[in-house]
């Protein structure tokens, strides 16, 4: 099958890594392939798969997109991975907990905070993934990152378990949220289930199972979403034939009356005759506004 250019929404099954799932899709002739946001093997749900030239929008998707998850955790247990797939390090008494305490504590997730990165994660230290150091029995440095939680909801409490829904900034670790909640309540907690329901700007309900994609490769083209749909807040700007030739040679699109409609810093897809040519940003160069090319696109 020819290399496709666009976005594919995958509903990742439980029990496989994101990399393994993407590797399966490579067998459909999609050698240039990537994704926007890893899911742990235990987790299920939405992965935005990027095919061909769509891989060039990955950073912009990850920078700007919130994600929503449904999950479950268990109080009274601490594992080395902070989820149910890890080795149990400690069992603690949770009998002092009640539903009101749990619901109040979950509200502490809201807003901006500094989150500890799990030792068993793909975060890098001196070029090596932390999980590789941890599995080798080596000491892993404590890393932190700033996150933002816009929504946190307790769906049910049946101690020692709790089900929840959370909407967070890209790159947040839900295992860390579970772990920190357990620390705050004094009894420990471990993530037991996780499903990604939303990854900006797409929903899980529109995703396809890995099995259906692999079993029906002839339908792949019909399931691909245009690259522009991945960044719906970006403009699409039609350039002239002369400007298109210049873009293909690596030149910016210079001052044009239509550029007056755009503010400096705004981003756009530059296209000509329905062909995407570049990702660009409106900049002021030597007193003149122009579309500065961020990445060229070759979708023909």
Image: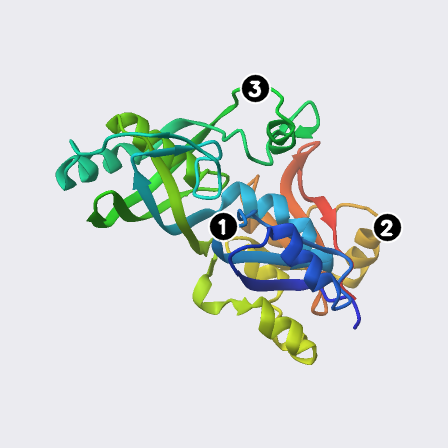
Vertical placement of residue 161 versus 148, above or below:
below
Vertical placement of residue 17 versus 124, above or below:
below
* Residue 219, quarter of picture: bottom right
> Taking the image as drawn, is residue 257 in sight?
no
**Residue underneath mark 1:** 42
- Residue at figure coordinates x 29%, y 48% from the top left: 164
Q: Residues within 10 Å of mark 1 (few under 14, many from 20)?
A: some
Q: Say what secondary structure mark 2 lies in.
A: loop
What label does residue 59 carry, if any? none
Q: Quadrant of the N terminus?
A: bottom right
* Residue 24, quarter of picture: bottom right
Front residue of 148/280: it is: 148
**Residue underneath mark 2:** 249
Which circle's residue, 3 or 1, is located before the other in the chain? 1
Q: In whole angstroms, how far apart are the C-alphas of marks 1 and 2?
A: 46 Å
x, y (%) of residue 211? 59, 71
Q: Nearer the viewer, mark 3 or mark 1?
A: 1
Q: Nearer the viewer, mark 3 or mark 2?
A: 3
Q: Nearer the viewer, mark 1 or mark 2?
A: 1
Q: Residues within 10 Å of mark 3 (few under 14, many from 20)?
A: few
Q: Say what secondary structure mark 1 lies in.
A: loop
Which circle's residue, 3 or 2, is located before the other in the chain? 3
Q: Is residue 293 left or right of residue 249?
A: left
Q: In whole angstroms, how far apart are the C-alphas of marks 3 and 2?
A: 45 Å
Q: Say what secondary structure mark 3 lies in.
A: loop
**Residue underneath mark 3:** 141
Q: In whole angstroms, how far apart are the C-alphas of marks 3 and 1?
A: 24 Å
């Amino acid at each position: 099958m020819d290399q496709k250019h666009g976005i594919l929404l995958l509903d990742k099954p439980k029990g496989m890594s994101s990399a393994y799932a993407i590797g399966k899709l490579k067998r459909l002739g999609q050698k240039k392939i990537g994704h926007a946001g890893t899911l742990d093997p235990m987790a299920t749900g939405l992965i935005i798969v990027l095919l061909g030239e769509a891989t060039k929008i990955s950073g912009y998707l990850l920078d700007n997109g919130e994600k929503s998850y449904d999950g479950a955790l268990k109080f009274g247990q601490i594992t080395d991975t902070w989820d149910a797939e890890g080795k149990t390090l400690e069992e603690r008494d949770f009998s002092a907990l009640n539903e009101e305490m749990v619901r109040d504590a979950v509200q502490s997730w809201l807003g901006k905070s500094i989150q500890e990165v799990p030792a068993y994660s793909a975060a890098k230290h001196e070029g090596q993934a932390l999980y590789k150091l941890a599995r080798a029995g080596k000491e892993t440095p404590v890393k932190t990152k700033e996150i933002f939680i816009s929504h946190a909801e307790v769906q049910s409490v049946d101690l020692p378990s709790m089900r929840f829904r959370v909407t967070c900034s890209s790159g947040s670790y839900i295992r860390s949220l579970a772990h920190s909640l357990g620390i705050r309540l004094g009894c420990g907690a471990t993530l037991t289930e996780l499903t990604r329901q939303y990854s900006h700007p797409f929903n899980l309900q529109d995703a396809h199972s890995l099995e259906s994609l692999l079993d029906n490769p002839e339908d792949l083209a019909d399931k691909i979403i245009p690259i522009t749909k991945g960044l719906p807040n970006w403009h699409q700007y039609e350039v002239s034939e002369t400007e298109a030739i210049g873009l293909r040679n690596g030149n910016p699109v210079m001052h044009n009356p239509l550029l007056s409609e755009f503010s400096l810093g705004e981003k756009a897809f530059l296209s000509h005759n329905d062909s995407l040519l570049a990702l660009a940003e409106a900049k002021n160069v030597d007193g003149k506004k122009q579309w500065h090319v961020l990445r060229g696109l070759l979708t023909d």
